Image: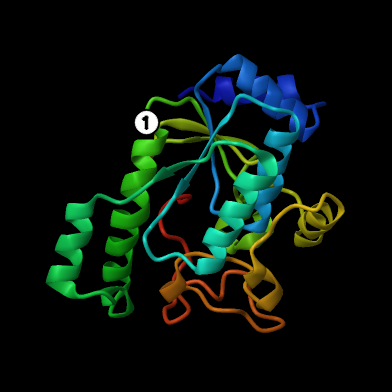
Amino acid sequence: MSTAIINTLLEKTKDFSIEETLAFLANEYKDKVVFSTSFGQEDQVITALIAKYDLPITIFTLDTGRLFEETYDVFHKTLKKYKIDIKTYFPQTSAVEELLNNKGPNSFYESVENRKECCFIRKIAPLTKALKGNSVWITGLRSEQSENRKDLHLFEYDGKFDIIKFNPLLKWTLKEVEDYIEKNNVPQNLLHKQGFVSIGCAPCTRAITPGEDIRAGRWWWESSHKECGLHQK
């Protein structure tokens, strides 16, 4: 993928608002623009914008089979409020069965390698299926979320999935996200009010304490880059 395409997108949208850029992408790439949501605060902001402007962008989510009940609750509330379709992708049943039969239900606690194996089966493989054949992938990534995300750009090419990635909230602060949600009455996961800033699978996520890094609650038992592989370069 030539950097010229990324530079062209940056030039054409440099004076656009987020919603204008979303509309531009939806028109430029027609039915090949997708948005992945995990129903976190950032993703809920983008969902609200897509719904508000009735943009022809496909919204999908990955159901790993081990999500919090509160995540399913906000999923349901989002469908009811915005009257939109959210396509769900699941991990391959045979792969999950093989993992549990060979290593048990909690092998991810035993090593980073095991954890990444679980993440691959439950998240990366379904994501690969969801992104296949599409041109633009919209995410809710923010640069202040982790050290690994500080080097991300508004538009970039993701070679792993062969797709253009658009990160509209990249420079937003957490306060800006929370203010938008409050002002626009956007449904949000109740766990956010209980110290959960970044929410993933239930066994792999805990609340953080004041002063801790935003991603400290993810895979809290290990020292790593706190990524599952979805957004690593």
- The N terminus, quarter of image: top left
Q: Colour scheme of this structure image?
A: rainbow
Q: Is residue 130 left or right of residue 149?
A: left
Front-most of 84 and 22? 84
Q: Secondary structure at mark 1?
A: loop
Which corner quadrant of the image does residue 64 belong to? bottom left
Residue ID at (66%, 77%) = 195
Give neighbour class at mark 1: few <14, some 14-19, many 20+ (Cα, 10 Å): few
Q: Is residue 182 visible?
A: yes
Q: How many marks?
A: 1
Residue lying at the far front of the rendered structure: 80
x and y percentages locating residue 40 in the rendered image: 61, 57
Q: Is residue 75 left or right of residue 130?
A: right
Establish if 201 lies above or below 230: below
Residue 154 lies, in percent from the top left, at 65, 38
Residue at 46% in and 72% down: 202
The residue drawn where x is 72% and y is 27% is 21
Residue 168 is at least partly visible in this image: no
Q: Amino acid at mark 1?
A: Lys
Q: Residue at x 82, y 26 (%)?
A: 15
Position above or below: 21 against 110: above
Q: Is residue 18 above or below residue 172?
A: above
Considering only vertical position in the picture, is 38 above or below 137? Answer: below
Q: Position of residue 181 (x, y in %)?
A: 78, 54
Q: Nearer the viewer, residue 157 or 138?
A: 138
Please state which of residues 18 and 38 is positioned toward the viewer in this rendering: 38
**Where does label 1 land, which residue?**
132
Q: Position of residue 153 (x, y in %)?
A: 63, 41
Q: Quadrant of residue 223?
A: bottom left
